Amino acid sequence: MNLFLTQARANRLANRRLLAAVAKLAEGEFHAPRTGFFPSLAATLNHALNVDHYYIAALHGDVQMRQVWASYQPAASAAELAARQAASDERLIAFCAGLAPADDERIIAFDRGAGIEHGPREPLGRVLGHLFMHQTHHRGQAHAMLSGTSVKPPQLDDFMLLGDAVHRGEDMLGLGWREPV
């Protein structure tokens, strides 16, 4: 089992559900002030996507990762964000699908502002673990923000277990996926 692929797919499913719920908000609610580390759903979810872009660029060895981060233009609407997040999630899934067990320890170089040659280096397994944790962390914040609206926050954690398959059938169909994953 490729656990990273399973996590990447769980990430895609959770983002799909959360952003579908966010899309139901009345116009302006996406940008409305909320309590959280970032002051709105838009700011929180755009931050998560920008970080995804940076880390996925690093995973692919893109030496322009810092420019990818710095040039990010926030999505103006929930629909735009959902489309961009879906593309990012699919890129991460494709990356994880190509991993071999020995790749866990492959070193990933980062540019934190002083160039890739001076940046930190981390094992791929830790980078992916961090990326999935970062996504989960900010989805949780957005989920809590959504609780303060008229839109019911969706269930986000029924992807991994086989016994939860009955709860994800519609999502699996919508994504063109089949069990087992």
Image: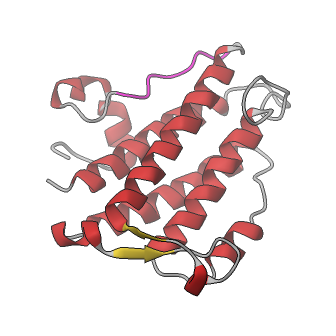
> For residue 125, what is the image quadrant?
bottom left
Q: Main secondary structure of the magenta part?
A: loop
- Estimate the x, y position of residue 29 in percent, counting from the top left: 80, 27
Res. 98 visible in picture: no
Residue found 27% across the figure and 48% down from its top: 6
- Estimate the x, y position of residue 177 in percent, counting from the top left: 28, 48
- Rendered position, 62 above or below 178: below
Residue found 59% across the figure and 25% down from its top: 143
Pick whichever, 170 or 106, lies toward us: 106
Res. 103 visible in picture: yes
Magenta range is 151-157
Residue found 61% across the figure and 57% down from its top: 51
Q: How many marks?
A: 0
- Estimate the x, y position of residue 115 in percent, counting from the top left: 65, 83
120 sits left or right of 158 in the view: right
- Rendered position, 146 above or below 139: above
Residue found 35% across the figure and 66% down from its top: 124
